[in-house]
Image (cartoon, rainbow, N blue to C red):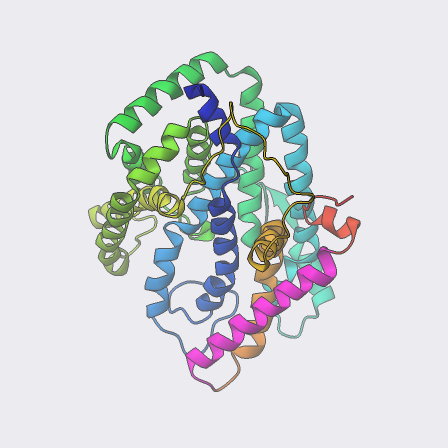
């Protein structure tokens, strides 16, 4: 007979391919997203097309409300399993190597390029060579009040690597807390909360007012995909907590449709305020604050709803009492083409994230000079950028042990 605890442990060990699929979807989707910003009327992307459209702002806004929060939630889920296997010390070391090394490498090698192209496209410093620009980029100082983005400068930036900075910071904070956190009270609390969430429909959406309050009162930061930097910490912690008990997963799957519909409705309700308010991201007017609150609540609802909709648990084999097959297979089945593609992209998520934005900006710098309609330029920009990003990963990152290490990949034996 399988006990309840054993079934929960088996489920916690189960590989969840939909989480890998969502990570791949978000990272590959960033090529489409950042390419679209080239044609957006609002915003300050590195390179801007002469002809722009406001449609991009609305479409991009719906991606902003759930995409990066979902990455942090999934990262929190993975952090719980990693801490269970490795312990706090090994987990911290692994995070420093897998995130800290590519962060340092990309900051030095890749990040100056988009800023240099920004200067050239705007007409400021257009005669300055790339090598002459580098000392200006690395003219930096420390600002403690910008934690964890301590390194600041007139031209220096973390760029799209802000995600890696925050994820590394949150992981190290979690490892430090895990050493002295009283585990038994935490598990008892998680058990009680999981029981309530499973018993009451919609209870998994109770954290939505917390995200609404942070967005309303702390504001939103455009440099970090629209959310306040510490909102992402809550998504990360929420993912860590949701991984502790299978009942949270069951509740997310049960309430997925309601959560998704509520999230879409709240986002649409927030849109008019973001369009009409003078300063919707940081303004203190009632319209701006209400719009941000609706946006924050929408984000949590969608982050609950999307994984719940995609979660299709696999049929589990009995843990006890099962008879072995009479003729076990001589070798494991050959993976299908779909499985091979999924494994390839799953391993490539972090390198593709690190590589994509400098490539998009470089291609956009060449494309915006064309006298072609926006749809034509956009299709060319996305196609070329995606092809170059995958090629750079395959030829410059994936094939050697050194480059795999520098971009945060596991070293193959």
Nearer the observer, 123 or 6: 6
Magenta part of the chain: 372-398
Image coordinates of residue 331 in percent, x first then y, are 69, 45
Image coordinates of residue 199 in percent, x first then y, are 26, 26
Q: Is residue 131 above or below residue 24?
A: below
Identify the image quadrant of the C terminus. top right
Q: In this view, does 107 lie above or below 32?
A: above
Q: Residue at x 45, y 36 (%)?
A: 233
Image coordinates of residue 171 in percent, x first then y, are 56, 33
Q: Residue at x 48, y 45 (%)?
A: 19
Identify the image quadrant of the N terminus. top left
Q: Which residue is drawn at 36% across and 51% down?
A: 65
Q: How many labels does the image show?
A: 0
User: Can see residue 52?
Assistant: yes
Image coordinates of residue 316 in percent, x first then y, are 47, 35
Q: Is residue 52 left or right of residue 267?
A: right
Q: Which residue is drawn at 41% across and 39% down?
A: 231
User: Can see residue 156?
Assistant: no
Q: Is residue 252 above or below residue 177?
A: below
Q: In this view, does 212 lie above or below 6?
A: below
Specify the farthest residue to the bottom.
Answer: 371
Task: State whether the magenta stretch is mostly helix, strand or loop.
Answer: helix
């Amino acid at each position: 007979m399988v006990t309840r605890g054993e079934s929960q442990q088996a489920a916690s060990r189960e590989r969840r391919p939909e989480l890998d699929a969502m990570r791949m979807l978000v990272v590959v989707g960033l090529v489409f997203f950042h390419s679209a910003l080239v044609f957006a009327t609002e915003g300050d992307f590195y390179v801007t097309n002469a002809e722009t459209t406001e449609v991009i702002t609305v479409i991009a806004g719906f991606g902003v409300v759930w995409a990066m929060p979902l990455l942090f939630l999934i990262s929190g889920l993975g952090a719980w399993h990693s801490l269970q296997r490795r312990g706090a010390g090994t987990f911290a070391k692994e995070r420093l190597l897998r995130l800290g090394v590519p962060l340092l490498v990309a900051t030095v090698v890749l990040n100056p390029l988009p800023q240099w192209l920004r200067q050239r496209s705007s007409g400021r410093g257009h005669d300055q060579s790339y090598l002459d620009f580098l000392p200006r980029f690395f003219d930096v100082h420390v600002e403690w009040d910008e934690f964890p983005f301590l390194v600041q400068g007139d031209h220096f930036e973390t760029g799209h690597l802000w995600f890696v900075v925050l994820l590394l910071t949150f992981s190290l904070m979690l490892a430090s807390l895990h050493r002295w956190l009283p585990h038994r009270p935490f598990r008892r609390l998680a058990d009680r909360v999981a029981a309530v969430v499973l018993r009451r429909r919609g209870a998994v959406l109770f954290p939505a007012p917390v995200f609404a309050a942070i967005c309303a009162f702390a504001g939103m930061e455009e440099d970090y995909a629209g959310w306040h930097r510490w909102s992402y910490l809550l998504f990360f912690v929420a993912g860590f907590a949701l991984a502790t008990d299978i009942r949270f997963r069951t509740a997310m799957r049960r309430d997925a449709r309601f959560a998704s519909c509520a999230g879409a409705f709240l986002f649409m309700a927030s849109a008019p305020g973001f369009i009409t308010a003078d300063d919707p991201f940081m303004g203190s007017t009632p319209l701006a604050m209400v719009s941000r609150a609706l946006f924050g609540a929408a984000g949590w609802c969608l982050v609950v709803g999307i994984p719940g909709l995609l979660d299709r648990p696999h049929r589990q084999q009995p843990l006890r009492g099962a008879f072995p097959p009479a003729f076990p297979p001589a070798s494991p089945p050959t993976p299908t083409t779909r499985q091979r593609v999924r494994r390839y992209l799953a391993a490539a998520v972090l390198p593709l994230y690190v590589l994509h934005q400098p490539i998009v900006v470089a291609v956009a710098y060449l494309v915006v000079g064309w006298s072609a309609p926006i749809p034509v330029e956009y299709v060319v920009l996305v196609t070329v950028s995606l092809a170059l990003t995958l090629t750079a990963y395959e030829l410059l990152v994936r094939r050697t042990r050194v480059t795999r290490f520098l971009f945060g990949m596991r070293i193959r034996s």
